[in-house]
Image (cartoon, rainbow, N blue to C red):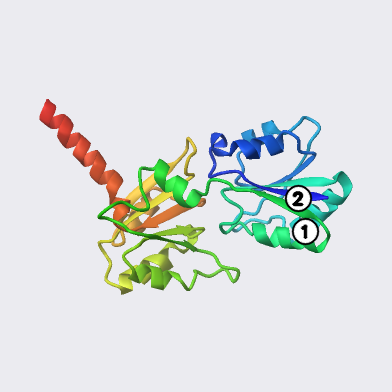
Amino acid sequence: MKLTLIGAGPGDPDLITLKGIKALQTAKVVLYDALVHPAILDHCPEECLKIHVGKRFGKVSCGQDEINKLIVASASEYGEVVRLKGGDSFIFGRGYEEIEYAAQHGIESEVIPGISSTYAVPALAGIPLTSRGVSESFWVVTGTTKSHELSADLPWAARSSATVVILMGTHKLDEIINIYTDLDKFDEPIAIIQNGSLPEQKIVLGTIGNILLLAKEADIKSPAVIVIGKVAALPGLTFQKIEEMVNKQL
């Protein structure tokens, strides 16, 4: 029996890996998450059983215990099962928990990494997480822990000069802003990218001091990636420089 854990990428169906596609092309049963683009399932054989087990904040969904049992049941019945998860399954994706549970039931596992929204979504929005002379490192922090709270690491990350990337934190934006405000970082650049990599992508650029108003005006919702740090100002600066260059030519 075998479990194949595939990262589907940040949303755009073209951003799944070739190895992931090859695994889907021979799949017998696929358990897929809510953030997996429907077009990715087109790579599966027509007779493949596709089961939606998505989990979304604030909505009734398939619990992790139920998903674990489905993995075991599917592998037992079909000999193999594909678990398709958004982004990369080892970055806040609970992928290791599923592998561990499968192993307890005699099921071997293969991991096919995915492109993580952590860095891909900012990149597609023109935001590098590191840039020479601007940022030397970055933190990746969850906005929703097991106890549904902000990570206790965020106050430490906010004190650093590193770029801070927050996943699953849109509904806790007020708390995030309060942490930076308490550190007098009112002018720290921040970007919020909703539906990154998809045609309906929405980007809001601002500072700690004005982002709450800007996000409200733009009606920002989940799923979204939050980027805080000097690099978050680069898209706006780049646009300004291009505009200045064009004006000089005119």
Q: Is residue 63 visible?
A: no
Residue 10 drawn at (x, y percent): 53, 45
Task: Please name the amino acid that badge 2 sits on.
Answer: Leu
User: At numbered mark 1, what does the secondary structure look like: helix, strand or loop?
Assistant: helix
Q: Is residue 101 visible?
A: yes
Residue 222 drawn at (x, y percent): 51, 52
Marks 2 and 1, Cα distance to the nearest angstrom? 7 Å
Does residue 127 appear to the left or right of 248 in the view shown? right
Residue visible at 80% across and 58% down in the picture:
69
Q: Is residue 59 above or below residue 81?
A: below
Residue 145 drawn at (x, y percent): 56, 67
Residue visible at 45% across and 59% down in the picture:
166
The residue furthest top is 250
Q: Is residue 180 above or below residue 3?
A: below
User: At numbered mark 2, what does the secondary structure look like: helix, strand or loop?
Assistant: strand
Residue 211 image-quadrant placement: bottom left
Tell me if mark 1 has few (under 14), some (14-19) or many (20+) residues whose alpha carbon lies within 10 angstroms of its own: many
Residue 162 image-quadrant placement: bottom left
Residue 102 image-quadrant placement: bottom right
Q: Kindly identify which numbered label has been placed on residue 3.
A: 2
The residue that label 1 is drawn on is 102
Which quadrant of the figure contains the C terminus? top left
Contact, mark 2 vs mark 1 (Cβ under 8 Å): yes
Residue visible at 48% across and 52% down in the picture:
118
Task: Please name the amino acid that badge 1 sits on.
Answer: Ala
Q: Is residue 148 above or below residue 96?
A: below
Residue visible at 57% across and 36% down in the picture:
13
Lower sequence index among marks 2 and 1 = 2
Residue 9 drawn at (x, y percent): 56, 44
Does residue 164 appear to the left or right of 75 in the view shown? left
